Image (tube, rainbow, N blue to C red):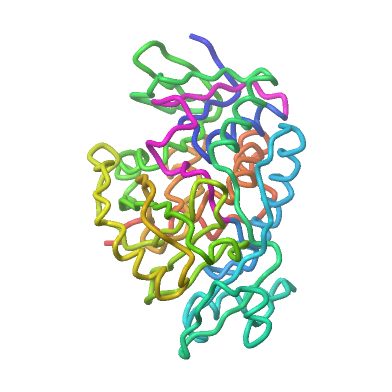
Amino acid sequence: MKSFDAVVVGLGAMGSAALYHLARRGARVAGFDTYTPPHALGSSHGETRMIREAYYEDTRYVPLLQRAYELWHETTREAGNELIVETGAVYAGPPNAELIAGILRAGKDHNIAINELSGSTLSIGAPWLRVPDNMVAVAEARGGYLHPERCIESHLRLAANMGAEIHTGEPVVHWEAAGDSVVVETKRERYGAARLVLSPGAGITDWLAGADVRTTVTRQPMFWFEPGPNAASLRTVFAIQIDEQRLLYGFPDLGGGVKTSIHYGGTATTWESIDRTIDFAEAKETAELCERYLPGVHGKVMRAVVCMYTNTADFHFLIDAHPAHQNVLLVSACSGHGFKFASAIGEAASQWALDGAPKLDLSLFSLDRLRSRP
């Protein structure tokens, strides 16, 4: 049985980054995936993923996010491939609701410049945006997007160049931990390791059930629309709060249409049973919201793909040691907003495996907060 310092299960956003950072530090490491990433069967595809600094969800994310920015730019240089583009970001919503209030709070707590857009500044900074009377608009300079498929490909390629073993098309069917060692079993072979990083995306729901943690998986369609006459003026990423939880978000036209979608509110599913077909009638609500807030930016639907969100009860991440096995790290359930952090979470996973603990405070993502109580 071949043995490693660490094994990573699941090579999407988090797993590919963990594999890269482990290999970068000289660890003997192997990664396993059911498919051949990057692919469109999980939660890490769709050509663009947003990155934003003034994090409305909780200001405690910001130090991790700022490290992620540094690492995405470093990996861009190392990979020789554009991974991150900082376009700036524009946000709109009711002034006291979660999106705008959270952005302002993060800006204040972490000295991030947030600029109000109104009157002439709105017409210059976001001429494509219609802001209703009950909303305000703000902007931050460092918002932008990542190319998810390129990010995963680059992490895996660089990891392989540094000696990592990559086993694609080899699903892990069982793992067990005893003492200071872990054994991972696939349909082909058994592998030993001192540390195990579990990052299988929506596939982690079954394993979490044994740890007394419940997660939900939702189906989230993404749409690309033909550019309308005002699309050329849309040069930043954006998010607009449309109700208590959901956002309309989107990206500039990168040559394949204006990508927009609704954040949260998807239908419940499982990773085994998800319906990946698209009825273009599903785009109706998104198109109507675009017409309301982004007049003239979009035209007809060009294409669509389906993504999955694996959500915790409080929509924060889960990054913590398994309750029964301290040499097994759970890295999943990133609740639809995790991709931007992958570079820094991968680094943190490597620090956990090789140093005993990550350098940054990840207590917000503890497992214990999610465990069922009698």
Most common SS among magenta residues: loop
Residue for point 63% across, 80% down: 122
Judging depth in this view, the residue of 362 and 219 nearest the camera is: 219
92 in magenta: no
Judging depth in this view, the residue of 20 and 248 nearest the camera is: 248
- Span shown in magenta: 25-50
Residue 85 placement (x, y as % from top left): 67, 51
**Residue 282 sits above or below residue 180 on the image:** below
Question: In the shown orientation, is residue 72 left or right of residue 303?
Answer: right
Question: In the shown orientation, is residue 242 left or right of residue 24?
Answer: left
Residue 136 placement (x, y as % from top left): 54, 84
Residue for point 73% across, 45% down: 73
**Residue 186 sits above or below residue 16 on the image:** above
Q: Is residue 115 visible?
A: yes
Residue 344 placement (x, y as % from top left): 64, 47
Residue at the extreme bottom: 133
Judging depth in this view, the residue of 13 and 85 nearest the camera is: 85
Residue 76 placement (x, y as % from top left): 72, 39
Total residue callouts: 0
Judging depth in this view, the residue of 110 and 140 nearest the camera is: 140
